[in-house]
């Protein structure tokens, strides 16, 4: 390769210009990629088999052989650059018979189209030159109107991505359909709006620190020029907003957004420094999409902005507060080594990064692309928060819209094929607040005489808004239903009329009796919930259970046979270590298991199930924490995350000792989460779960699953006193209404065939006092892929559609209303 680096120039010709690129630069770029990024977490196995092992030069030599160019690097790059010069985002690139990985092509484009600037597009000619497209003559006038109505801005990072990904181009390229006026002018500007401050919820507010972004998403609800061209606030505006928060003790969290707030470091510093002095503020959530589309904002100047953020995070911790970074990713083609590096660095230093994903028709609405996206981001250390369905129903967005039913069906696909720790909530942002589908909200019925509107039940009440947005009661698109919450008209198509489930009546609950003394939490903690979960298929080992396609659970005694099983199935991404003996007291064996897991390329997470974390946090000494930190591999290539799974039942169990411990673990990139079962008479009330979710949030523990039925403890204690479905709706509504969106758990039913989301990836059949659950994610093929000899257990019914139906103990229907 040394001779080739000194050999001449390669021509790169696009629709608008011709460049001469030094061959050596291209060779260096591709060999660097091949040396560092050829791993199953980033590229396909077929490509790994082609380039094999070794350094970048050896792998490049094998690639040249495979594509038919032998020692002719010049010929290979001439062919590749000819293809790249034609690219406008459509299709993949194949040389010879080898499909070249997206990330490899990006490495080449970084040499061909260098730079980190962002570009505001004002004319069609500029658009054509920058994006390598041609606008048809009969569309040029309309396209110019689009540019003038909905501003276009691109970063060089997105320009490179758009050349080779139609899914990225779809998000940022203007299109003449944006002139379609169907939909709203604006979906939301906050129920309360004062200067840069907006408020939609009693416990949190939004600071709009900057009105522009480095890149403009075409589906953004602030896409109109009137929003893009608003004057940016100044420090006095920030201080005024801080004063409002200081005088509003109910406000616990601040969402700092824009535009992109990171484009104004002065406003950001003023915000963080002054909110740090407001005692009742606990969390600052900093929202930016630059992690995905303009990573140089954080990585430029030797990462000065990242280092600044880490310093501010530590300063906030000293005040008992936490910092989180919220970002959007929509399609796996957006995930770059740069974006993964930013997430890695933040999480390793204790700053949570969470992902929100708008659901876009013809982009990420099929399922497999979301599994790939969320798996990549989870490996990097991010937490998945929301999928927003549907895309914002505003002018110019109609090509992105899909019916509600499409988003609902995705929930079942993700539940079947994705780690439970990577599944986001399915959420809709209504004009008065968010709902979580089939727990805190649902579709009630169509709006009469308007095919574009549906009634959605929300968890909000008229009284809720009185303290901060009394004018909400005057809206003409709401009504108060029989249970006392607000239904609101929402611009969407349902797609499947069976998803209209009517209103919850103000009727007597069934199954909510709490006669008898509930078990103590100490008794519950010392019971069998630390053991390995039930296996949905036979594994041939008592030391290995498989409760899901992506997850196995191991005892401390697991050995060669168990790891041979994991090595034999690339669907397994998560290992849970669980044992009758508390795993944290046997760190030598835990270390051995984690090191073996690290040798399996497709495993990206190991979790330790520790009940001792709840009742004996002092056992997590500094030495234990450092040992665990050494096992946590948050990295760009081949990550292996370490997490702690624990169990809290009531808010009173959560202490300041837990908060200190969680901070220490978080600052080493280790997440702690709680899986909590509802127990009759103990915590099966809206107030109990709201207080628990609030306590966990303040402590830094993620409230992952709230099990509504199906765990052995629930079968034992809830059978005689089943939890009513009305109770579950009340719990979900209260947590959503009164808490932070970051407090909301997933509502889960555990069964012998796996877990399902309450009402979302499940539906119910009520037969007298018996509740049967249809498990929508699963069918016979699903289980036989894990175990060829699998057959339905005797207690399982199977519908005509092949969906299994199982009976669930400890759950009761509510009158004629069930989520069917």
Image (cartoon, rainbow, N blue to C red):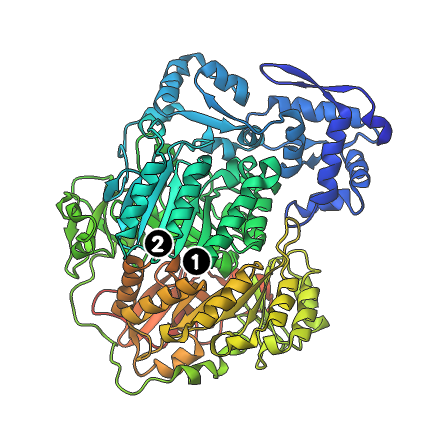
* Disc 1 target residue: 319
Q: Residue at x 64, y 60 (%)?
A: 569
Kind of element beneath mark 2: loop
Judge from the rendering whether residue 570 lies leftward or rightward of residue 146; answer left or right: right
Contact flag, marks 1 and 2 (Cβ < 8 Å): no
The quadrant of the image that shows the C terminus is bottom left
- Can residue 517 be seen in the rendering of this structure? yes
Query: Badge 1 local density, few (<14 within 10 Å), some, or many (20+)?
Result: some
Judge from the rendering whether residue 612 lies leftward or rightward of residue 280; answer left or right: right
Q: Residue at x 43, y 53 (%)?
A: 385
Residue 278's tag is: 2
The quadrant of the image that shows the N terminus is top right
Query: Badge 2 local density, few (<14 within 10 Å), some, or many (20+)?
Result: some
Measure the alpha-carbon separation of dots 1 and 2. 9 Å
Q: Residue at x 16, y 48 (%)?
A: 470
Which residue in the rendered view is the most extreme toward the top? 137
The part of the image, by quadrant, that contains residue 625 is bottom right
Residue 170's tag is: none
Residue 658: percent from left, percent from top:
47, 70
Of 317 and 396, the residue lying toward us: 317
Which residue in the rendered view is the most extreme toward the right? 3
Of 576 and 466, the residue lying toward us: 466
Residue 693: percent from left, percent from top:
37, 65
Residue 543: percent from left, percent from top:
63, 76
Residue 172: percent from left, percent from top:
46, 30
Kind of element beneath mark 1: loop
The part of the image, by quadrant, that contains residue 391 is top left
């Amino acid at each position: 390769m040394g001779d080739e680096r000194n050999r001449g120039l390669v021509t790169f010709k696009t629709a608008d210009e011709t460049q001469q690129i030094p061959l050596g630069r291209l060779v260096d770029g591709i060999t660097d990629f091949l040396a560092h990024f050829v791993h199953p977490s980033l590229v396909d196995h077929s490509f790994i088999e082609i380039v094999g092992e070794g350094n970048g030069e050896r792998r490049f030599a094998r690639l040249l052989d495979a594509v038919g160019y032998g020692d002719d690097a010049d010929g290979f790059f001439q062919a590749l650059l000819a293809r790249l010069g034609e690219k406008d985002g459509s299709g993949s690139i194949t040389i010879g018979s080898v499909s070249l990985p997206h990330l490899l092509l990006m490495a080449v484009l970084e040499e061909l189209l260098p730079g980190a600037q962002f570009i505001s597009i004002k004319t069609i000619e500029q658009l054509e030159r920058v994006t390598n497209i041609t606008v048809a003559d009969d569309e040029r006038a309309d396209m110019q109107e689009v540019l003038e109505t909905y501003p276009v801005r691109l970063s060089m990072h997105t320009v490179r991505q758009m050349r080779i990904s139609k899914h990225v181009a779809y998000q940022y390229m203007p299109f003449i359909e944006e002139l379609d006026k169907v939909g709203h002018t604006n979906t939301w500007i906050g129920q309360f709006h004062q200067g840069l401050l907006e408020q939609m919820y009693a416990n949190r507010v939004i600071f709009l620190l900057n009105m522009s972004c480095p890149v403009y998403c075409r589906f953004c609800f602030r896409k109109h020029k009137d929003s893009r061209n608003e004057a940016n606030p100044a420090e006095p505006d920030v201080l005024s907003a801080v004063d409002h928060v200081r005088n509003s003790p109910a406000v616990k969290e601040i969402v700092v957004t824009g535009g992109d707030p990171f484009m104004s470091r002065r406003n950001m510093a003023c915000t963080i420094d002054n909110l740090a002095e407001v005692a009742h503020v606990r969390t600052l959530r900093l929202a930016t999409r630059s992690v995905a589309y303009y990573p140089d904002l954080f990585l430029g100047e030797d990462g000065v902005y990242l280092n600044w953020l880490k310093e501010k995070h530590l300063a906030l911790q000293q005040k008992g507060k936490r910092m989180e970074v919220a970002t959007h990713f929509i399609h796996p083609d957006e995930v770059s080594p740069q974006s993964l590096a930013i997430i890695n660095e933040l999480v390793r230093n204790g700053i949570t990064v969470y992902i929100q994903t708008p659901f876009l028709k013809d982009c990420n609405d099929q399922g497999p692309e979301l599994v790939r996206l969320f798996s990549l981001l989870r490996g990097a250390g991010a937490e998945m928060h929301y999928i927003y369905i549907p895309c914002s129903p505003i002018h110019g967005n109609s090509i992105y819209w899909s019916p509600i039913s499409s988003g609902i069906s995705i929930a079942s696909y993700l539940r079947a094929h994705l780690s439970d720790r990577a599944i986001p909530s399915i959420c809709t942002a209504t004009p008065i607040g968010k709902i979580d589908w089939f727990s805190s909200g649902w579709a009630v019925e169509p709006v009469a005489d308007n095919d574009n509107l549906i009634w959605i039940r929300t968890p909000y009440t008229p009284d809720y808004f009185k303290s901060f947005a009394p004018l909400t009661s005057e809206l003409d698109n709401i009504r108060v239903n029989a249970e006392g919450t607000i239904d609101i008209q929402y611009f969407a198509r349902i797609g499947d009329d069976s998803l209209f489930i009517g209103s919850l009546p103000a009727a007597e609950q069934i199954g909510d009796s709490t006669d008898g003394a509930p078990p103590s939490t100490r008794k519950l903690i010392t019971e069998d919930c630390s053991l390995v979960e039930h296996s949905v298929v036979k594994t041939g080992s008592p030391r290995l259970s498989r409760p899901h396609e992506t997850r196995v659970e191991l005892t401390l005694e697991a050995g060669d046979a168990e790891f041979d099983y994991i090595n034999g199935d690339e669907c397994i991404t998560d290992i849970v270590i669980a044992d009758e003996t508390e795993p944290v007291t046997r760190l030598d064996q835990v270390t051995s298991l984690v090191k073996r897991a690290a040798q399996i390329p497709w495993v990206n997470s190991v979790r330790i199930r520790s009940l001792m974390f709840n009742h004996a946090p002092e056992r997590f000494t500094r030495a234990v924490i450092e040992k665990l930190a050494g096992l946590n591999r948050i990295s760009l290539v081949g990550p292996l995350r370490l997490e702690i799974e624990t169990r809290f039942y009531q808010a009173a169990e959560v202490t300041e000792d837990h908060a200190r411990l969680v901070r220490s673990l978080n600052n080493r990139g280790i997440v702690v989460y709680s899986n909590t079962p509802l127990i009759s008479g103990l915590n099966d009330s809206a107030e109990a779960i709201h207080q628990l979710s609030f306590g966990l949030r303040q402590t830094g523990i993620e409230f992952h699953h709230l099990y509504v039925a199906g765990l052995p403890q629930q079968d034992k204690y809830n059978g005689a006193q089943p939890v009513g479905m009305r109770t579950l709706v009340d719990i979900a509504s209260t947590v959503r209404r009164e808490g932070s969106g970051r407090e909301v758990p997933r509502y889960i039913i555990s069964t012998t065939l796996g877990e399902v989301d309450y009402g979302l990836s499940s539906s119910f059949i009520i037969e007298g006092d018996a509740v049967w659950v249809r498990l929508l994610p699963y069918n016979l093929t699903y289980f036989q892929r894990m175990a060829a000899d699998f057959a339905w257990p005797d207690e399982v019914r199977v519908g005509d559609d092949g969906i299994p139906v199982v009976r669930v103990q400890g759950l009761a229907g509510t009158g004629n209303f069930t989520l069917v």
